[in-house]
Amino acid sequence: MPVATATVVTVVAEVRVLMVGSRQITRSVFRQLDVIPINEVQPMGRVNERCWPDQYHEFWVVGRHQTTGELVRGELVRSLQVELAKINGTPYRPPSEHDAMQSVKYREWKVEYDELPLIVLAGLK
């Protein structure tokens, strides 16, 4: 039988973190940031974080508010629900999360925001 040779391959992956001054933003601090419509965020990156247990999908964009410059976050599905309600002329009755996620606009936004770098938050909880 031939002897197989084993090799070790080193793979480098880039991990981005969000810093304010010299301190890394934790999950706890991230959850306290103001939530605004995602299309009002000048994005720095995306964060996969489940802030509400009943939500089955949360896709966050973190960045600066386009007007104020403050550090904020925007959530894709909630922002899309508001946007679709405006388009449909029903601002006080947004579509369900499921309906929003089935829309063409969701797929367009998801493709756009998936291109952002993933930001890893510090903290255990």
Image: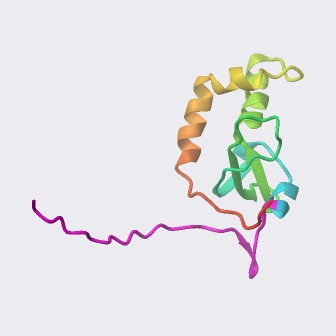
Residue 57, placed above or below residue 88: below
Q: Is residue 50 left or right of residue 114?
A: right
Say which residue appears at 83% left-offset and 42% top-offset: 52
Q: Is residue 98 left or right of residue 117?
A: right
Q: Position of residue 40 (x, y in %)?
A: 74, 47
Q: Nearer the viewer, residue 37 or 124?
A: 124
Classify residue 92 by image quadrant.
top right
Q: Position of residue 10 (x, y in %)?
A: 37, 72
Q: Is residue 102 magenta?
A: no
- Taken as a whole, is the magenta stretch helix, strand or loop? loop
Q: Nearer the viewer, residue 84 or 47?
A: 47
For this orientation, the residue located farthest to the bottom is 22
Q: Is residue 2 magenta?
A: yes
Q: Is residue 45 left or right of residue 56?
A: left
Say which residue appears at 18% left-offset and 64% top-offset: 4
Q: How is the image coloured?
A: rainbow
For this orientation, the residue located farthest to the front is 1
Looking at the rendering, the stretch of residues picked out in magenta corresponds to 1-27
Q: Nearer the viewer, residue 27 or 64?
A: 27
Residue 38, placed above or below residue 22: above
Q: Position of residue 98 (x, y in %)?
A: 70, 23
Residue 76, placed above or below residue 97: below
Q: Is residue 55 left or right of residue 43?
A: right
Say which residue appears at 79% left-offset and 30% top-offset: 82
Classify residue 65 by image quadrant.
bottom right
For this orientation, the residue located farthest to the left is 1
Q: Nearer the viewer, residue 58 or 113?
A: 58
Residue 101, placed above or below residue 27: above
- How many numbered marks, from 0 up? 0
* Quadrant containing the C terminus in the rendered view: bottom right
* Quadrant containing the N terminus in the rendered view: bottom left
